[in-house]
Structure formats: structure tokens, C-alpha cells
Image (tube, rainbow, N blue to C red):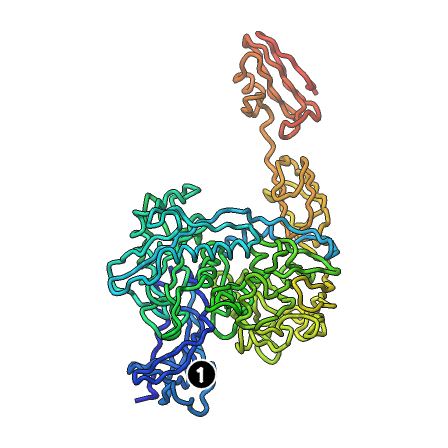
Amino acid sequence: MRGKLIVVILLLFSYAIWGQAEIAFAVHAAPDIFTIEQPDGAVLSARARGDEWNNSIETADGYTIHKDVDGFWYYVSHYDKNNPVVSNVRADKSPPALIKRGLRPARKHLRAPGWKGRAARVSAALSDEASPSGSASAESAATQTSPVSAEDRKIVLILARFTDRDGTYAEESFAALIGSLTDYISSASYGHVTLSPASEAFGIANNGVIGWLNMGYAHPDTGGNIDDRNRKLTRDAMLAADPFIDYASFDSNGDGYVDSDELAVVVVVAGYERSYSASYVPAVWGHSWSLGWGSVKSPVVDGVKVGDEHDDRGGYAQFGEIHRGSESDQHQATVGIMAHEIGHLIFGLSDLYDTDGSSEGIGAFGIMGSGSWGKASSDAYSGQTPVLPCAWSRKYLGWIEVSQGSGIASINAAGSDSAAGQNTVYMLSTGLTHEYFLVENRQPVGYDRGLEQWLGGGFGGLAIWHIDENTISNKISTNFVNSSECYPGGPSCAAGHYGVALMQADGKWDLEKNINRGNRTDLWYLGNASIFDAESVPDSHLYDGTPGNVSVTDISAPDTTMTSVLTGAVPQYQLHTAVNPAGSGIIAPDCSAGCLYDIDTSVVLTATANNGYFFSNWMQCDLSSNNVCVETMDADDVVTANFELCHQPVRIAGILNYYTDLQSAYAAAEDGDIIQTRAVLFTDDLFANRNISVTLEGGYNCNYSSVTDKSVVSGTMTISNGNITIGDFIFGN
């Protein structure tokens, strides 16, 4: 009987398990059409939507369908919260009246609470260095120095087969896939990062591929869900690979963990990739996750832990070996899915598609959106030419040097041969440090040829991005950076908005409305839209509706080098000063409540100790000399002056033992010692009765750094033995 409630199990975890879990990141569903064959032989075309936590299947014309217990696919009439209610019409027939396209579950999928995220850790580490700086001219703008060195990252693919499913493609094919990934990472990072195969002893040694290895049990076939079976499979694969790889050799910091930036472990699962098609089993959905929590412990191999969550620094990636959409469309998984998961695993990037499934986020305009499925016009399959990371992702990782300011700008296409870290992205400041715009040039060159999948041949123009770092920092830990879409006539931008939003030049907001993953008129160019300002649609206002004070005008025709006139506010940054411990001194000027300065302003700070303390050192000061700090404002800064309590009034030089009175110091002194005293009043008597010669030096300041006055002794000094040489003392009242 049709019309009954069919429960789709999207999550197989109990809530108690989720309380411990790290978030798993996954690839967005492929845009490709695949075929579904009904049990009676009828055939229909369909595509997957969503990710591993919240996915559905649609017909080619956008109607949501679901497979019933009888094996037939039916149209979904509506959702009861997260549960699809199917109609009595099979999906290979015309849709019934009144059923809407693009039905989605009403309830958003769960995410693990409290996860801080590798991305958040990377962001904190880069926050000071990655802040943009520059002069007022876009033509000669100063640029930041990238904090990411040209380091060699290592990767190993472990190929896992099963008692009921062998691998299909050879070791050499996956070695070639690593080569494709290596080229992509080098291009995307402009040479900052080299990814190379790990040393291993399986088959063709040192090509970074181990397997196929038999797991000794049947394929788990987790399909459109991921759960502990995926994690157990990863653990088993790591253990099975142990005879062929010395995991300990990759623990470069010797902390007992092989973290993902030391060795990226990727498990390739024999069978199909579920994000590509729902028609073939067994399958897994490509994702990045971790071990070492819940019921799946991280393996200890060669004396180190591998794949462990380890304070959000470890983990693994996993994907299905085969992409298959029909009887005639079967091929090895393409590089895009692996590039996306490596973006999570090694570099800590968050997903920039809409992870709650209600919109498209950045769409196809970046590897962390749908760009992992990039396909150039010359490609046979989606994912062969993954799209480059968007401007924000490259800035976030320090792979580009963002030019700052206003004036005439020449902007090289992100994927062109002339592109480099310092000439592809410009930043327009709104005067707020957290909210700004980025401008880049996207053309069908290099890996951006993958955009032809959605934009067609001959596309090109400027991509203008609206960035809100507050939204990003608040939502990156839950992977909801781009889950709050807003647009005129729709959800309010003041209430919630993307962290990384493409200002689509055609003003249709198709990405926010979940209509498509991008089109050529989303870009800005002469002949489409050549002015972005307060009056354009979309406009340059801030999310609270106030003017952003930025514009991009005189935009040229599409080319690998495009020109435009950039106008932005003079960036200002907050300086906060602090005294440690509280009450120990003062700093002038006093910026304890915050002082606002224009970019590149040099602020001179002077620290003065209060009575009983002396100045020790500065923290986070650009340039310091004693108690004076010169701070150059190129980011929001906090500068701290540290003070210490004054030392005891007497010490023995060299030994640096401190005493409260002269007699105690004299009793501890040895022949030839120098006894130093601060410029204070001593009321105690001194009896010199030892056969030693010592020097008594007075007048030292609070920390004994210099002689600034004289010491005063109001007591008596009696010398019955030995010698005392005295300087900078006053005896008597």
C-alpha cells in the first residue's frame, strides 16, 4: 500500500555517541545524471543531492524520490520532519499533481557538539600572519608574507578489498591518481605545498599505494550513511598495511601520534562511491573523519597511534573505488573527491557548500563546494579537473598574498600560468576587520577549466566575495559556515548569512535559492555587469544594511588579466594594551579599552612601573627597546607589558641570591664577592668579623640593572676582621 511512512535512516549513531564525536566532513554529491532500473526493468534518470549526513535522490527534472521496501522507487509527496512520505506513483512515471520539486527534510542533520576543529586551530595559528596589509594604491600595494612554507606533505593510499568484493583497478592506476593530486595541490597553493607519496614496501615500492589488502569480511556497504563500520574498516586497513609501512618514521615531532599533516592516510574501498550514484552497491560515501573515540580505537602500530583524533590534528579519509552512473559509465574514482577530502584532512578547510542542504553555498566556485566535481569540456568524467579553492580558502591557508587598497588593479586569473601568490586576489576593506570583500579573476585556464561543467566554454570574469570572519569563526566548529542563506525577499541577512558568499553579478541569488551551482553570469565583466557598488544588484552594503564603502568599477572584458578600479575604506585595526600583573604599572597611551588606528600606523607605547615593581618585557610587540614598544597596525593586536615585583634589597652579584638585610648577605659571602644593595634605607647593624675581602656596592634600582641613587645605612658598621670596600653609600642620618 502506497502513502505509508518510510523512514530514511540518515544517521546510525545514538545521541550519546554523538556527544563524543568529531565531525566527519564529506564531499558534496556529484552533479552527474545516473540511471536507476526498477525491478520490472523500467529505467529512469536521477541525481544525488546533499552529503553523507543529509542526502536524497531526485529525478533529472528535480523531483525527490525514494526506494520503498518492495525495491521500487516512488515520488516523495512530503516530509514528516526527517522522514519521507512516498506517493503511490512510481518514479519512472510522470510525477503526480501538486508534488513540488526539490523537497528536503525539514530537520537539519546533527553535528557533534563541542568540536573545535583542525580548521579552527589552523585559523588561530595563521590569524596574525594572514592579516592583509598594504598601501593605498592597488597597483603598488604591499602584500603579506605567506606563513605556509614549501613543506613536503606525505600521503598513502590503502586499498581495501573484501571477501565478497575484490578491487577493480590496479596499484599503478592509484599511483597515477596520487600524481594528479600532487599536481593539483602544487597549482592550488602556488608551490607552497608539495604532496608526495609516502615510502612503503608493497608491490611497486614507494609509490604511496598499499593494496589490495583483504579485510577478511564482507563489504560494509554503508551507502548514503557513515558510521562506526567506516571507522572500523579504516582501522583494519591501517593494521593490514602495517607490514608494508613504518608508521613511526612519519612521526616527525616524536609525540607518539602520526597526525594528518605528517602522513595523510586515505582508504580506498573496493566497490562504488555513493556520492556519485545511488544505483550500484556495495558503496561508501567519501568522507574525512577520525579514530580514537567512541567504540573504535585508533591502532597502535610501530609504537605510534595512526588516524587518532588527537586534539583535532589527526584522522583519515575514505572513498569508494568506482564511479558508475550507468551500464556504460564506469570508471576509477576521479581526483576531485580526493582533493576535497585532503582539503579537510591535511589543511583543515571546512565545507563551503550548504551542509544543511537548503542552498548551494559557494556552488561550483571552489574545491570545498561542488568544485570537487569539476569537469573541463575535454574531460570524460566529473572530478577530472577539480576547481581551484576560492579566494577565501587560499587566503585562509596563506597560499596567496592579498593586496590591499584602492586604485587601478590588474588581476591575473587564478589558474593562469602568470598567476602567483601575490597577484590573484585583492581585498576591499569596509573599515571593519571581520567583514570585507575579496576580488579574484576566474577564467577557463588551469584547474579552473573544471568550471566549464556548469559555466560552459568561454566563461570568465571577476568573482567578488563577501566575507564575514565572525560567521566563519562562530560556525566553523560545526561545519555550518555557509548554512544560513539570505537574499532579498527571502531570509534576512541581518539574522543570518553565509560566511563566504559569492556576489552573483546577475542578481538572481541562484546559489542561495538552491536553483543551480553557478552559471557564467555570476561573474562580473564588461557586457554583463561591470559596476559593483552601493547601487548595484547585488550591492556592497554590509550585512547589517549599512554602507560597505567599497566598489569595483570599470571592470574590463573577460581575459586572463582583467582590470578594474577598486575603492575601499582605509582599514582600521584595534589595539588593546594590558598590564601583567594588574596594578603593577601603566602603559601610555592607555589602550586597555581599545584604540582604533589606520592600517600601517606606528604606535609608540611606553611602560612605566608602579612602586614596588619593575618593567620586565613586552609580549606580542613588533619592535621593542627596554620599556618602549613600537607596534605597527597591520591587524587587531593585543600588546602586554609584563612587570615583576622588586627584588629583595640585598644580593650577592653573580650568584644572584637575594637577602632582606646586610648581615645575612655578609654571612653568606665568600672572599672576593660583591654585595649589591638597592637604593633603600637599612636600619640594621653590620658586624664584619670574617677573614674575607668583599665589596659593598649601593644605589641599585629595583631590578639591579643600574645604579641610580645611593643606599643609606642608619645603623652601625663594625669591622673586626677582613676588609670591606664600600661605594655609593651614605652612613648615618
Q: Is residue 55 visible?
A: yes
- The residue drawn where x is 47% and y is 86% is 100
Q: Is residue 362 above or below residue 57?
A: above
Secondary structure, mark 1, is loop
For residue 583, which quarter of the picture?
top right
Q: Which amino acid does label 1 sit on?
A: Tyr
- The residue drawn where x is 63% and y is 40% is 618
Q: Residue 636's x, y, as percent?
A: 64, 53
How many C-alpha atoms fall within 10 Å of the one at disc 1: few (<14), some, or many (≥20)? some
Q: Give the position of the N terminus as an image quadrant.
A: bottom left
Q: Residue 276's x, y, as percent?
A: 41, 70
State the residue in front, 215 or 710: 215
- The residue drawn where x is 58% and y is 13% is 672
In screen coordinates, is 718 left or right of 115? right
Q: Residue 362's x, y, as percent?
A: 55, 68
Q: Is residue 120 visible?
A: no
Q: Residue 307's x, y, as percent?
A: 37, 53
Mark 1 sits on what residue? 63
Q: In this view, does 493 lie above or below 590?
A: below
